[in-house]
């Protein structure tokens, strides 16, 4: 987890935690249910497996998600929001609402 003393602004801290290429999308998809890697991959098809793995590891490192490995063959790994991750849901909801308004105001050119 990153040290809070490294930031001059709370917005900077928030962006650092969820500002990765796919981090906000991963968190968004984990709001309502626990997902496995392949399920997340299907929900974010533009993410390469390498990039998705990197983003998941960073979210886990920053304690925003929980990774559970089950001792079965084949391996089973599930991801879910931690309590800290759940605390960011209002931010994600606000991003969604803003994005809907933005998209509604755009016209195809």
Image: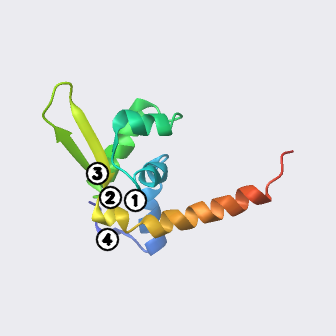
* Label drawn at residue 4: 4
**Mark 4 near mark 2, Cβ–Cβ under 8 Å?**
no
Whether label 4 touches label 1, CB < 8 Å:
no
Which sits earlier in the primary sequence, circle 4 or circle 1? 4
Look at discs 2 and 1 and give the one toward the viewer.
2
**Of the residues under marks 4 and 3, which one precedes in the sequence?**
4
Q: Give the residue at x 71% y 60%.
A: 102
Residue 60's tag is 3
Q: Nearer the viewer, residue 56 or 94?
A: 94
Among numbered discs 2 and 1, the one appearing first in the sequence: 1
Cα distance in 3D space between marks 2 and 3: 6 Å
Query: In the rendering, at what x and y percent does residue 89 appear?
Result: 44, 65
Asked which secondary structure carries label 1, the reply is: helix
> In the image, 71: left or right of 47?
left
Q: Secondary structure at mark 2?
A: loop
Residue that mark 2 sits on:
64
Which comes sooner in the sequence, label 4 or label 2? 4
The answer to whether the residue labelled 2 contacts the one labelled 3, judged by CB atoms less than 8 Å apart, is yes
* Residue 31 in picture, x, y percent from top left: 41, 56
Q: Is residue 5 left or right of residue 71?
A: right
Other-residue count near label 2 (Cα within 10 Å), few / some / many at <14 / 14–19 / ≥20: many
Residue 27 against residue 49 in the figure, above or below: below
Q: Residues at badges 2 and 1 in contact (C-beta under 8 Å)?
A: yes
Residue 100 x, y percent position in the rendering: 67, 59
Which residue lies at the image location 50% right of the left edge and 39% below the top edge? 44
State the mark number for residue 17: 1
């Amino acid at each position: 987890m990153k040290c809070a003393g490294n930031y001059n602004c709370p917005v900077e801290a928030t962006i650092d935690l969820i500002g990765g290429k796919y981090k906000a999308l991963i968190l968004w998809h984990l709001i309502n249910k626990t997902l496995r890697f392949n399920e997340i991959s299907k929900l974010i098809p533009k993410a390469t497996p390498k990039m998705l793995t990197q983003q998941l590891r960073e979210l886990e490192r920053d304690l925003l998600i929980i990774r559970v490995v089950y001792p079965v063959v084949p391996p089973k790994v599930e991801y879910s929001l931690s309590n800290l991750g759940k605390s960011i849901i209002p931010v994600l909801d606000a991003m969604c609402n803003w994005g809907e308004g933005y998209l509604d105001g755009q016209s195809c050119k």
